[in-house]
Image (cartoon, helix red, strand yellow):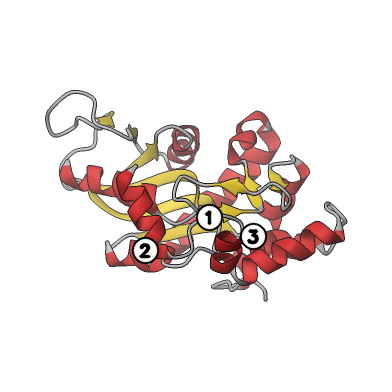
Amino acid sequence: MTALHASEWDRDAALTTARILLEIKAVNFRPEEPYTFTSGWKSPVYIDCRKIISFPRARNRIMELGVEKIGRHVGYESIDVVVGGETAGIPFGAWIADRMMAPMAYVRKKPKGFGRNAQIEGEVPVGQRTLLVEDLTTDGGSKIRFANALREAGAVCEHTFVVFFYGVFPGAFDKMQAMGLNLHHLCTWWDVLEVCREKPYFSEAALKEVRKFLEDPVSWSKAHGGVGSADEAKLKDAVE
């Protein structure tokens, strides 16, 4: 199985991003000691997009691709304010806002204080079309919470951009689309695996286990002590 892309440009952008993430060692494979996400999913893979901030040339290229992606899929004059999600989304939001010559703000995970803008730092006037930016998304839960905070403050939030989308956990796209939120991303784990065919970044045994996870993430998670359905993940997320 391989990633599906809207165009050849999207595919090239995805593979370029994957190569950069592998080069800066932001990609982690650990099948023998799985990672546990806040939603309860178990995963043999983890992406550390925060590492991008320490590599100027890498982040410049990724942000260049990100702004081009936004222009192609959202529009060049369709965003009034770029909003970063606390905390990882703040630097990415700032770089994208700068390139788009747009105002920038950020949204907190929880309200601080009272009033319409209790979760928002910066100016986001009522009716402004916002682009929510974060580094990555697994199942879309945090994006919905941030989008709801922006909407409650009177902003229009229909689009969110991330560098990396896991692209495996069930219900992520459906959940966001049901909330009227369109996800735009540069690459997924399938793109990373495709690039791994070009160069032996990881052992064949690790790659084999990662492929098993990607082909059936629900069963893999359940077999390794994690949640075994989107409903379980939703329930855990709601409790936390």
Mark 3 surroundings: few (<14), some (14-19) or many (≥20) residues within 10 A: many
Callout 1: SS: loop
Between 138 and 35, which is closer to the camera in this rendering? 35
- Quadrant of image for the C terminus: top left
- Mark 1 or 3: the one toward you: 1
Q: Residue 231 bears which disc, if any?
A: 2
Q: Quick check: 194 left or right of 160?
A: right
Residue 130 image offset from top left, x and y in percent = 30, 47
User: Residue extending furthest top?
Assistant: 113
Q: In the image, what residue type sits under mark 3?
A: Trp
Callout 3: SS: helix
Residue 108 image offset from top left, x and y in percent = 32, 33
- Quadrant of image for the N terminus: bottom right
Between 79 and 34, which is closer to the camera in this rendering? 34
Q: CA distance from mark 2 to mark 3?
A: 23 Å
Q: CA distance from mark 1 to mark 3?
A: 19 Å
Mark 1 and 3 residues: CB-CB less than 8 Å, in contact?
no
Sequence-wise first label, 2 or 1: 1
Q: Which residue is mark 3?
A: 189
> Would you identify the image quadrant in which residue 150 lies?
top left
